Every structure is written in C-alpha cells, then in structure tokens.
Amino acid sequence: MKVRDRASYDFALASAAVALEMDGDNVVTARIGLGGLPAKPWRSHEAEGALAGQVLDEARAREAAEAALAEAVTHGENAYKVELGRRTLVRALLEVKVKEVAP
C-alpha cells in the first residue's frame, strides 16, 4: 500500500508491505515492511510480534502499528508522517486480511 500526496509522485509519503499467514482470523505469521517515513524502508519485527498468534481485527492492527512506530523520531515538519505511517499500516493489514489467495 502506497500513500502519496499526488498520483503524479513516484515516491510514497508512507508505505506498508504486508504478508500474512492466517488460520481463520488468527495470524500465524506476519511479515511487515514500512517505507516512506525514514530514508530507507525497514522491516518491523515489533509489529510482526504484536500480531503473531492473535486475532486480527482493527484494535490489534492499531496495536501493531503503535509497536512499529513506537520509537519513531521526528524532525519539525515531518511529525505528521508517524500518524500517516500508523494509518497506512492499519489499512494495509485490514485489506490483506480479507484478500483471497488462489492455491
């Protein structure tokens, strides 16, 4: 999921790449990558850990987003990116949860 200011921009203000292994509504494993916030994308082991073995709902997605960005450091005018990153991850998690994958 890529959140941009305008469609003409190639770079994301915030992005989230999510892969979930699910058993019903329970997360077996999660792989989460975040980008657009710092200079280089990173994998969030904190968010993955917050989801493992849990039922994925909006509250759990928010907890994972909080864990992912708990240590975010801002510099003046980019403080909005932390909340944008949280919202982007929550949205990506909830959208991936309902996706059907063909065998």
Image: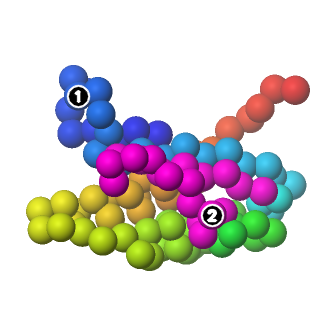
**What residue do we see at 71% from left, 55% from top?**
30
Q: Position of residue 47 (x, y in %)?
A: 59, 66
- Along the viewing direction, whichever of 40 and 54 lies nearer the viewer: 40
* Quadrant of the drawing holding the C terminus: top right
Q: Residue furthest top?
A: 8
Tell me where residue 69 appears, x and y as whole percent: 44, 69
79 left or right of 2 in image: left
Q: Which residues lie in the magenta part?
A: 29-48
Mark 1: secondary structure: loop
Which one is nearer the viewer's eye here, 92 or 13? 13
Residue on which disc 2 sits: 45
Please tell me the numbered disc located at residue 9.
1
Image vertical order of residue 95 relative to residue 69, above or below: above
Please state which amino acid type lies under the numbered disc 1: Tyr
According to the image, what is the colour scheme of the structure? rainbow
Amino acid at dot 2: His
Residue drawn where x is 45% and y is 47% of the image: 41
Relative image position of residue 43 (x, y in whole percent): 56, 54
Above or below, comparing residue 60 to residue 2 in the picture: below
Image-based side of 94 in relation to 29, left or right: left
The secondary element bearing badge 2 is classed as helix
